[in-house]
Image (cartoon, helix red, strand yellow):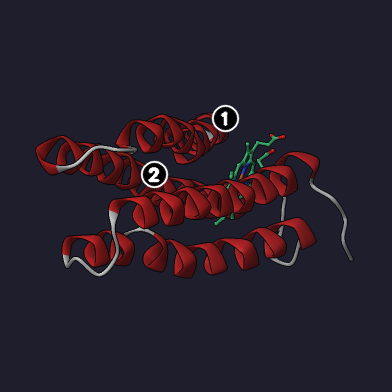
Amino acid sequence: MYKSIVFIHILSSILSIGPFFVLFVVLNQMKGKNGEVLVSQIEVFQTAIRIVKHAGHVLVVSGILLVWQGNWPWSTSWVVMTLVVMISSIVFLARAFKPKIRQFNAGIIDSNVLIQRLRFSVWQYIFLLLIMLWLMVAKPNIW
Ligand code: HEM
């Protein structure tokens, strides 16, 4: 049972990080496009974010189950640090993508600014996920 949860946990971590790399391709294709083509590419972008969001929920639930069923107490430093990074990235994800797309739809920013800002957010998010991945794999004793 525990091994199955570890498997689900790792699978959801792959689905949380993987789609972001596809987003770079989508962002490159969005350059210089407008009208319906651009709208459909933004939809692909939003679908990828949705997958990441659902995978993130599975990641958290399976992580909680692992701590509950396993030998790592909640006070373990790498678990605490992962939670800290995770909570800050949840706050970040809520503001990173949707408001920018909404600003574009409202005509406040143009497609070049949108692409630039989304690219920056994707890098920030990958960076946060890689910190968490490192904490999980290296399990450092920080205190
Ligand atoms: C609520 C947050 C999380 C909790 C409570 C949590 C908990 C855990 C625990 C207890 C283990 C140890 C399983 C074992 O070796 O017996 C583990 C492993 C793992 N976690 Fe998480 N996790 C969380 C979030 C994450 C995130 C955000 C990622 C990726 C970005 C991640 C990726 C992994 C990976 C790849 C492993 C396997 C590491 C290994 O076995 O060496 N986890 N997690």
- The residue at the point 45 percent across, 35 percent down is 24
Q: Secondary structure at mark 2?
A: helix
Residue in the foreground of this view, choosing between 61 and 39: 39
Residue 9 on image: x %, y % = 51, 38
What crowding class fits label 1: few (fewer than 14 Cα within 10 Å), some (14-19), or many (20 or more)? few
- The answer to whether 3 appears left or right of 79 in the picture is left
Residue lying furthest left in this view?
36
User: Residue 138 sits in which quadrant?
Assistant: top right
Q: Is residue 52 visible?
A: yes
The residue identified by callout 1 is 3
x%, y% of residue 133?
A: 66, 43
| Residue 69 visible here | no
Q: Give the class, few, some or many, for how many residues have Cα within 10 Å of label 2's Cα (few <14, many ≥20).
A: many
Q: Which residue is mark 2?
A: 52
- Tell me which amino acid carries mark 1: Lys
> Which quarter of the image is occupied by the C terminus?
bottom right
Q: Which residue corresponds to the image point at 50% horizontal and 30% vertical from the top-left?
A: 4
Q: Position of residue 89 (x, y in %)?
A: 53, 62
